Amino acid sequence: MRIILIGPPGAGKGTQCQRLIDLLKVPHLSTGEMLRAAVKAGTPEGLQAALAMNEGKLVPDPLIVGMVTRRLEARDCRDGCLLDGFPRTLPQAEILDDLLERRAMSVDGVIELAVPRDELIRRMLARKRDDDDPAIFARRIASFEEQTAPLLEYYDRQGKLACIDGLGTADEIFERVKVAVTRFERATKGR
Ligand code: AMP
């Protein structure tokens, strides 16, 4: 299964991703984590990414696409993966479809973890991480709303989107995630 998990910053994606990779037994491809590792290692890609990340902006497409392509081509991703943080924009979604198609692969399903903006701000204020400067956090939410909404429409038109209520306990949310995965499995068999 090749699944994408999409949600605004602070939606609880990390928790659900962890549970999903345990369930599906596929690698977790988090572009945020890959980028943070590159920044920490001080690689040329990391240095370039840090410029955008420090301002709460998206890093340039060629950089992120290069990283994801290398990862998708790795042996452990042959039977599937969980994409987290990529694609983030419509052009990235189109690039991904193209990339997968050329390798006779496709996206099986997309899960949107929907959480209202007020709740995201409340959670951010309650947890306070290093990159949780309120102004930067607000910019990340705005960037999500502007750039990711067209992406959801794109997958909805393909019949691949499952929008899940991101309010409730981690267990309750994961039950909804599992229902979506079962739906994707049925749809994939029918394709
Ligand atoms: P995340 O942990 O997914 O919120 O990602 C942290 C930061 O990494 C984002 O604020 C962006 O600057 C950058 N980033 C992660 N994924 C992408 C992507 N698909 N395209 C562009 N920038 C990204």
Image: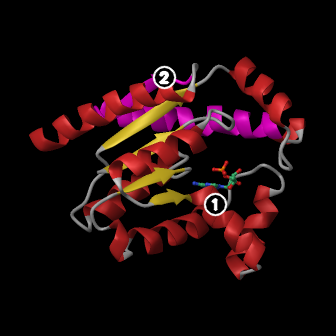
**Please, which residue is most extreme toward the bottom here?**
43
Asked whether the viewer can see residue 191, the reply is: no
Q: x%, y% of residue 22?
A: 42, 50
Asked whether the viewer can see residue 86, the reply is: yes
Instruction: Give the secondary structure at mark 1.
Output: helix
Q: Residue at 29% x, 51% y: name it.
A: 1
Query: Quadrant of the rendered structure where residue 183 is?
Result: top left
Viewer-proximal residue among 149 and 41: 41
Viewer-proximal residue among 135 and 18: 18
**Please, which residue is most extreme toward the left here?**
190
Quarter in which the C terminus is drawn: top left
> What residue range appears in magenta?
137-166
In the visual, does 84 lie left or right of 132?
left
Query: Quadrant of the rendered structure where residue 122 is?
Result: top right
Q: Residue at 50% x, 34% y: name it.
A: 150
| Residue 157 drawn in magenta | yes
Residue wearing tag 2:
172
Q: x%, y% of residue 104?
A: 21, 63
Q: Is the CB of the residue bearing disc 1 within 8 angstroms of ligand 1?
A: yes
Q: Amino acid at mark 1?
A: Glu
Q: Earlier in the sequence, mark 2 or mark 1?
A: 1
Instruction: Give the secondary structure at mark 2.
Output: helix
Dominant SS type (magenta): helix
Q: x%, y% of residue 66?
A: 52, 72
Q: CA distance from mark 2 to mark 1?
A: 26 Å
The answer to whether marks 2 and 1 mark residues whose Cβ atoms lie closer than 8 Å is no
Residue 50: mark: none
In the visual, does 102 lie left or right of 88?
left
Q: Amino acid at mark 2?
A: Glu
Residue wearing tag 1:
33
Q: Is the CB of the residue bearing disc 2 within 8 angstroms of ligand 1?
A: no
